[in-house]
Image: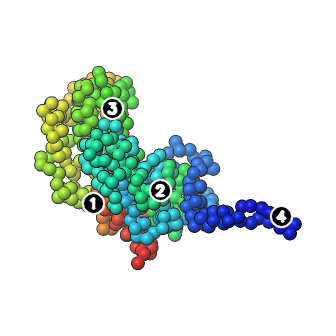
Amino acid sequence: MAFAIINGKTAAYQSTTDEVQQKRLNRTDFRYRIRTAMSTKNSSDGTSASRPPQPSSTRPPTSRVALKTNIVVIGAGQAGLSSAYHLKKRGLAPGRGFVVLDQSPQPGGAWQFRWPSLRLSTVNRIHDLPGMRFSEAVDTDATEVKASVAVPRYFAAYEKAFGLPVYRPVEVKVVCDRGERFRIETDRRDLSARGVINATGTWEKAYVPVYPGADRFRGRQLHTKDYRTAGEFAGKHVIIVGGGISAIQLLDEISRVTTTTWVTRRPPDFRAGPFTEDRGRAAVALVEDRVRRGLPPNSVVSVTGLPVTPAIKAMQARGVLNRLPMFGEILEDGVRWSDGTSLRADVILWCTGFRSSLDHLAPLMLRELGGGITMTGKLATQVAKDPRVHLVGYGPSASTIGANRAGAVAARELMAFLGEEKT
Ligand code: FAD
């Protein structure tokens, strides 16, 4: 804004550049406002990022909401980006129509945090996001590229290519029902929206079962999500707990540098033959049936089993897959089974999976007594108790291909429910 003395009075006038600037601002005023609002950390209520999200609103009902939009997508992993892509494709405007909030420091969802030895050659399979192939952004021949490098590169290119309004790092603390609209409280400013697509994955909710004596163990305990390299364990005896794909991958790596013991609750369910699409569909159908009945989704491996890969055959040949049942308690220097046998160990690695990270939705009281959330809709993404909420990447859609499909359906169903469907 420029000032001049006109007729003896100071008057503001807009120079051409200002006018152009203002027009551009007007045109992007909403995005400009959200970018500004999301760049300042919210410290008014004294909540700090380290304090876990409060299960209920920490704002007085009268406090001003920063921004209103129609749909908020929480999380910018595969599930969030697929949902955002389809919301835009269905004509919802980035910013006023929908925004994506992501607490991760950069694009890539939870893939940016995966351990360095997880390479494109050792991931199960990362499915393309809708509208852009992985190979358009990443040289897929370079199979030794870390997944934690390749996927962020792909997601960054994707967000840019489709102009998706992703704001990060923004942590959603709680989502509260305010009648017509939801109030989405973040560690930045708050938003209000008519619908929510939650796509927060599982990485934030590492699951470690409680065993007696865990606190007296003098060795090291860590979860899959803390794992970096096998070299860290050289010269140590490592107990690896868990029967899933990650447990097998880490057992394979660690057993090459030191001694290991593998323990699982149930005998491993090795399944010969290729993991076909039919087997994939059958596994998804089992999980879908559970969530439609309001039961918590169970672990992936409990429905897929462990496909016998060449790596598993090699491990069997090396004799590292001699599984023991779960121990009963943890000692200062190891573990003990119920029959009294004990084993000395320096490290317990809990490859015991993840749970869906949904704490920020607690005020909506979506859970059933059994602990699950009853899902409905074409692909079981819609919350039966509140159709304005969709969970993408939850239960049957907790895979890259599942997240793709679920994102498309959630966008369509939610826009239709809110009367936002563009003809
Ligand atoms: P995520 O990728 O976890 O993204 C969720 C995003 O939400 C993150 O950026 C997170 O920071 C953000 N977020 C969380 N909470 C909040 C909050 N409160 N506020 C704001 N943002 C928030 N699937 C496959 O199909 N193929 C594979 O090869 C494969 N390998 C896997 C290997 C491992 C070790 C694991 C753990 C999973 C693997 N999966 C694989 C499953 C995989 O997680 C999913 O397939 C998919 O990538 C999950 O995407 P998502 O978008 O649901 O979650």
Identify the residue at horizontal 86%, vertical 69% (top origin).
7
Q: What is the three-letter code of the residue carrying label 4?
A: Ile
Tell me residue 218's x, y (percent).
37, 24
Answer left or right for 4 relative to 304: right
Its colouring scheme is rainbow
Identify which residue, 41 or 35, lies in the foreground: 35
10 Å crowding of disc 3: few (<14), some (14-19), many (20+) = some
What is the quadrant of the C terminus in the image?
bottom left
Amino acid type at circle 3 is Thr
The residue where tag 3 is placed is 229
- Amino acid type shown at disc 2: Val
Which residue of the protein is positioned furthest toward the bottom in this rendering?
A: 423
Would residue 6 be found to the left or right of residue 364 on screen? Answer: right
Q: Nearer the viewer, mark 1 or mark 4?
A: 4
Q: Which residue is mark 2?
A: 166
Return the residue at label 4. 5
| Residue type, mark 1 in image | Glu
Q: Residues within 10 Å of mark 2 (few under 14, many from 20)?
A: many
Taking depth in this image into account, of 74 and 243 the one nearest to the observer is: 74
Q: Identify the disc placed on residue 288.
A: 1
Q: Nearer the viewer, mark 2 or mark 4?
A: 4
Secondary structure, mark 1, is helix
Question: Gap between marks 1 and 3, in whole Å?
Answer: 35 Å
Position in image of residue 266 (x %, y %)? 20, 41
* Element type where label 2 sits in the image: strand
Tell me which numbered mark, 1 or 3, is placed earlier along the sequence. 3
